[in-house]
Amino acid sequence: MKPITTAIPYFSESELRCKGTGVIRLDPRFAEALPKLREAWGPLSVNSVCRTPEHNKNSGGNPNSLHMTENPKWPTFGAMAADVRWRGWSVAEQLRFARLAYSLGWSVGLHNGFCHVDRRADLKLSNLPQSVFLYGEWDKSFSPSDVMS
Ligand SMILES: [Zn+2]
């Protein structure tokens, strides 16, 4: 599998690149799935997609984060995660988006400011199954089980 290093449908290079280094390196499964999520939902604004390992470390990311362009733990071919900005959406819209993403095979991390979505399930690893989880600051307007139901 070859990493994608350019813009993809609906998403510009500036939205995808590592904020610290400018690198774009997307896992091809993620690069195919993100435009499909955009088509199913409508316009999406992403905060954070690629992070090089150094930038991830400097910005306090999880050491095995699926945002990383090269992953020390998981067999990815580039970044597999995006943070979708949803501050200001209604709770109903947030729940609808999280459920849609989950139904399309995304793992979902709930945060007040953004919805983290990643393609971990595409790795087909028994120790990294599709999941819904809390990602830092979350005011509990709904729970992971609401997303999976
Ligand atoms: Zn994230």
Image (cartoon, rainbow, N blue to C red):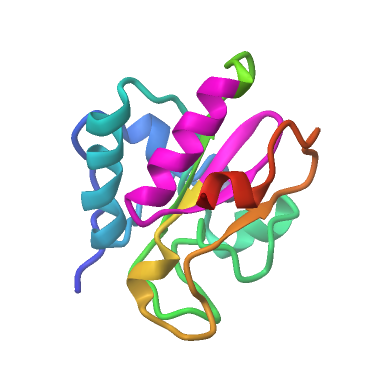
Residue 54 in view:
yes
Which quadrant: the N terminus? bottom left
Residue at (52, 52) in percent of width and height: 148
Q: Position of residue 76 (x, y in %)?
A: 38, 73
Q: Is residue 103 magenta?
A: yes
Q: Position of residue 30 (x, y in %)?
A: 31, 55
Q: Position of residue 21 (x, y in %)?
A: 51, 47
Residue 7 in view:
no
Q: Which residues are magenta?
A: 92-116
Residue at (36, 49) in percent of width and height: 103
Residue at (59, 63) in percent of width and height: 65
134, above or below 37, in the image: below
51, above or below 12, in the image: below
Indicate the quadrant where residue 111 lies. Answer: top right
Residue farthest toward the bottom in the current orientation of the protein: 126
Q: Position of residue 145 (x, y in %)?
A: 62, 52
148, above or below 10, in the image: below
Residue closest to the eye, 92 or 133: 92
Q: Is residue 112 left or right of residue 71?
A: right
Residue closest to the eye, 94 or 35: 94
Q: Is residue 15 magenta?
A: no
Number of marks drawn: 0
Residue farthest toward the front in the current orientation of the protein: 149
